[in-house]
Image (tube, rainbow, N blue to C red):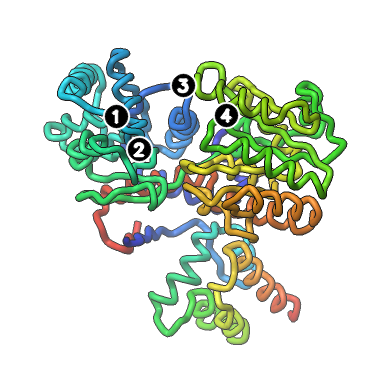
Amino acid sequence: MQSVSYVMPTAVRASSMKEFREGLERVSLSSIAYHMFDARLRLEKGDNDFSRWLEQSLGENRLADALRKVDPYTFTQDGLRRRLLSLVDQRLQEE
Amino acid sequence: MAGLDEYQPIVGEGVVAELRLLGERLHGRRVLNVNSTRVGGGVAEILNRLIPLLQEVGIDAQWDVVRGTQEFFDLTKRMHNALHGKPETFTAEDRETYNIATEQNLGSIDLNSDIIFIHDPQPAGLIRAKRDLGNKWIWRCHIDVSAPAPGAWEFIAPIVEKFDLAVFSAPQFSRELPIPEVLIAPSIDPLSDKNRELSDSEIEQVLQRIGIRSDKPIVTQVSRFDRFKDPMGVIDAFRLARERVDCQLILVGGGATDDPEGAQVLKEVCDRAADDTDIHIIDLPPTSNVEINAIQRASTVVIQKSLKEGFGLTVSEALWKGKPVIAGAVGGIPLQITHKYSGILTHTVEGTAFWIKMLLSAPEFAARLGENGREHVRNNFLLTRHMRDYMLAFLYLENGRDSIVEL
């Protein structure tokens, strides 16, 4: 048994926290799975794409760490999206 | 007919955008679906919806059916039953009947498409044209072929093995083949009459028409009057539960009139119910989609106490309506229900009775099961997911067997 992943760019882009939040709400659960689960294998070291981007592009190290701590295997797919959104919302409220 | 945009409020913008993106990658591909009937049955129902949606995203999807004599369709019906496990004998004459029908269809169906998508055994013999055309062929098996009667699988195996790809609905329905196989679960259409949202007054009208009062909780099983659906067991479980919690039972099925065994089971069910005024047995014509929808929506708890089952999509239909479902742990049902999370799985009459009582007495827990079930169906058993998987299967044929494919 083998799983095959098909990866393609979507039209959703983010260059700020606000846009990131909007995108997180709009993309399909497959996109979230790709950046949270597949990334752990792709990037190794158990990291995910969102944390890496938040750190490298926005300097949001604390939020990046918070997202890194989320164990995606302990959520349903919808639950994972809600958890990520709530972490981003907490950070946006601090501003 | 509903376009893709109408699914957006249900499945979200991201899912629909994904379908359009996949469509762009497959733009202009000619995909010919072939099955054995344009009307009736789950395959035709799904193709009726999928073909226009595939066309909408840019795929040149077409649909044709094989034609044949009564003798041919009698044979394929026997083959269907035998693949499900019913003992049947197949002779050299049967082979000849199949070959003659196949030859005639080869002469009348234009198979010059990029992908030929064959549904079930009836049109599978058309694979003979592949050698000259050099296109890609998919065999989509909608039936459970894991335990066929002797001789049945041997009849079609040499044909199936010539395809480029086989598609099964669930791992337990599949067989080992020398060709690649993929798993694609069936689906329900949230916009069809059987599943669309109904207003309270529409539901009330149906209840009035069939003579049901919603003055006490309704426990319902929707299914053909068939022993494998265990309607007797449902009545027994209901009666046990009713000793503790006041409720009524609706057993609703359809099409018993043209199925001799169905008529017999219906009679036995009526005898078992006798003059119990809390048990309503309703035999509806097979086209009563809005009525079934309304009955499911009016129910407090939905049962699917099958003893043997195919995929069992009536479970997803009820879960999609947010109903707590108690179902037999057979066939494809455990793929739709995680016990005590998105529904209840049972194995016995007593277990079913216990959970009827439990769910009627704990409405908050019951509602949570229904909500979780609805989300599970939203993510896994709606038509849009089915469409996505078919498009991914088409891409698989073009991209070989890499484990990550960048499109």
In the rendered structure, which disc, 3 or 1, sits on the residue that comes first in sequence? Answer: 3
Q: Mark 3 highlights which residue?
A: B39
Q: Residue furthest left?
A: B132
Looking at the picture, does residue B9 appear above or below residue B354?
Answer: above
Amino acid of disc 2: Gly
Q: Mark 4 highlights which residue?
A: B225
| Side of B75 relative to B270 (left or right) | left
CA separation, marks 3 and 2? 26 Å
Q: Nearer the viewer, mark 3 or mark 1?
A: 1
Chain hosting mark 1? B
Residue at 32% x, 19% y: name it: B74
CA separation, marks 3 and 1? 27 Å
Report the disc number at residue B88.
1
Q: Nearer the viewer, mark 3 or mark 2?
A: 2
Residue at 34% x, 42% y: name it: B145
Count the marks. Answer: 4
- In this view, the residue in front, B20 or B297, is B297
In the rendered structure, which disc, 4 or 3, sits on the residue that comes first in sequence? Answer: 3
Chain hosting mark 4? B
In the rendered structure, which disc, 3 or 2, sits on the residue that comes first in sequence? Answer: 3
Q: Residue furthest right?
A: B215
| Side of B220 relative to B96 (left or right) | right
- Tell me the SS state at disc 2: loop
Amino acid of disc 3: Val
Amino acid of disc 1: Glu
Q: Residue B305 appears in which quarter of the rendering?
A: top right
Q: Point out residue B169 in the picture as x, y percentages from the top left corner.
A: 41, 45
CA separation, marks 2 and 4? 20 Å
